[in-house]
Structure formats: structure tokens, C-alpha cells
């Protein structure tokens, strides 16, 4: 049953976590709520982490039933803004273009989302809306993640530049060669949509990539979704440690 935000008590949660491929659950779920937005209904899961309630969104659904180009990114981000979320941690299974190896955790510094059109500003009748993305990520949130990683002896690599493609197919060798020339060292099918909308919403956010496989032309074998899931399964414990540590730092 859908619940309109205007009819429910304000949810006292400031942090949200968005998980991707292979990251479908987080902490102890308290309840889920359907939030109505101008872009559709978003289902938000309220979970308990380190004694604190936060929001969790598995962007592909708990059974990975939603393809990357079909995720209702605008509804998800609008719902987070509507309930008062002010900080988001997002995680992305990512192909490796250069610099990293499978299983690496990488803090994203910038992204290339030219091919993933996503915006809340479809209409300029009330005035032009062009948001500055010179520094898309929160320096403070990145700093906390680095400190949490260090305390827990987790290697969190830096300088991730995420290229965002539309999916659901993997990229071609020529596309990866082109993306490498643009400065990207990672590639993912969902980041460009989400990061653009979070920036427009002025919600502070930080992103971590899990290097799940070598991209086309770099890998010596055909790419498979199973390979990504396998690496993500091995990384979930580390991601949970980062989230728990982050929550403890901000409460």
C-alpha cells in the first residue's frame, strides 16, 4: 500500500545508503515505506546500523529485477530529499579500465556522465537551472570514509574517475579504449544518473566503487555478470564495515 509522505510522520533519518549489484541488504530491516514523488513511488527500507536508523535503497531491487536503464533514479533521489536525508553513501560494482584490480575498493573523485541523461530540471519556465559540478562529492564524507578504512585496516584506494554508460550491455573494446582516453579508470552503468541527481538535490554524497572485473579489451576473457556477483559477494563484509564505521562517526 502506497503511503503519501504528507500523511506520515517525518522520518528522523539523515543518512541513506544506496547499494548496487550484489549489495541487496543492509543491517536489520525495521520497515519499508513507499514514498510518493512527482516522478513515481520509491520504496525506502529503514534499517538499523550501529544502533542508528538509516535508509537503504537496493537500486536494482532485492532480487536484482530492475535493469540499470530502468531504475527510477529520479523517484529514489526525490524521495530521499523529501524525507530529509542530507547525506548519501552510494556503492557501485565497476569495470576496471586502468590502475586497479578486481576486489579493490576505490573512493570516487569525479565522474563522466555525458551519456546518462538525468535531471530534475526538464523545464526552464521558472528560470535557468545549471548546477555546478566542479566538486561533485563531499570532502568531509570522503575524509570520514578514509579514516574509517584506516582504523579497520581496509585498503580504500583513491582517485577513482567513473565513466557512466547506459547499459544493460557491457561496453565494447572500442568504447573502453575511448573512455580511457577521456581520463576514466572505472566504468559503471548507474553512477551517472544517480550522481547527477544527487548533485542537483544538493544532498552531500560520497561514492565507493568495487572493482569487479576488467573491462572489455582489458580482460582476456568474455565478460559475465556472474564474475561481478562473485567479487561483490566477497566484498560485502568490507562494505558493511565501512557503513558501520561511518555511522558511528556521524552520530
Image: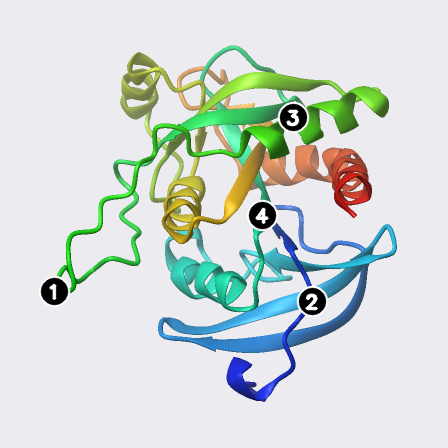
Q: Is residue 182 above or below residue 202?
A: above
Judge by depth and name the residue closer to the eye, 234 or 20: 20
Front residue (pair 93, 239): 239
Label 2 Cα crowd, 10 Å radius (few <14 / some 14-19 / many 20+): few
Mark 4 vs mark 1: which is more N-terminal? 4
Q: Please identify the quadrant where the N terminus is shown.
A: bottom right
Mark carried by residue 125: 1
| Secondary structure found at label 1 | loop
Name the secondary structure under disc 4.
strand
Q: Residue at x 56, y 85 (%)?
A: 3
Furthest-left residue in view? 125
Tell me the CA gap for discs 3 and 2: 24 Å
- Can I make out residue 137 in this image? yes
Identify the residue under disc 4: 88
Task: Measure how far apart labels 4 and 1 are at the Cα level.
Answer: 30 Å
Residue that badge 2 annotates: 12
Q: Counting residues from the N terminus, which is met first, the one under dot 4 or under dot 2?
A: 2
The residue at which mark 3 appears reads as 143
- Who's the residue at 45% across and 15% down the image? 218
The quadrant holding residue 228 is top right
Residue 187, how many percent across, how many down?
A: 43, 29
Amino acid at each position: 500500500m502506497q503511503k503519501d509522505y504528507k500523511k506520515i510522520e517525518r522520518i528522523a533519518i539523515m543518512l541513506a545508503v544506496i547499494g548496487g549489484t550484489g549489495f541487496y541488504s543492509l543491517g536489520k530491516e525495521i520497515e519499508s515505506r513507499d514514498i510518493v514523488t512527482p516522478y513515481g513511488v520509491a520504496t525506502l527500507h529503514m534499517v538499523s546500523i550501529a544502533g542508528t536508523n538509516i535508509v537503504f535503497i537496493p537500486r536494482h531491487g532485492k532480487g536484482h529485477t530492475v535493469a540499470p536503464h530502468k531504475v527510477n533514479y529520479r523517484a529514489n533521489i526525490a524521495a530521499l530529499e523529501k524525507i530529509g536525508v542530507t547525506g548519501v553513501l552510494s556503492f557501485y560494482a565497476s569495470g576496471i579500465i586502468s590502475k586497479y584490480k578486481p576486489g579493490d575498493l576505490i573512493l570516487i573523485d569525479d565522474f563522466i556522465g555525458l551519456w546518462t541523461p538525468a535531471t530534475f530540471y526538464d523545464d526552464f519556465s521558472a528560470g535557468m537551472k545549471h548546477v555546478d559540478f566542479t566538486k561533485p562529492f563531499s570532502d568531509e564524507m570522503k575524509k570520514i570514509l578514509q579514516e574509517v578504512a584506516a582504523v579497520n585496516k581496509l585498503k580504500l584506494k583513491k582517485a577513482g574517475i567513473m565513466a557512466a554508460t547506459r547499459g544493460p550491455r557491457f561496453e565494447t573494446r572500442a568504447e573502453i579504449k575511448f573512455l580511457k582516453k577521456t581520463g576514466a579508470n572505472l566504468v559503471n552503468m548507474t553512477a551517472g544518473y544517480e550522481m547527477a541527481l544527487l548533485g542537483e538535490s544538493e544532498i552531500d554524497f560520497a561514492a565507493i566503487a568495487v572493482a569487479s572485473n576488467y573491462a572489455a579489451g582489458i580482460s582476456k576473457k568474455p565478460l559475465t555478470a556472474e564474475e561481478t556477483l562473485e567479487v561483490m559477494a566477497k566484498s560485502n563484509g568490507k562494505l558493511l564495515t565501512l557503513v558501520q564505521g561511518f555511522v558511528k562517526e556521524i552520530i
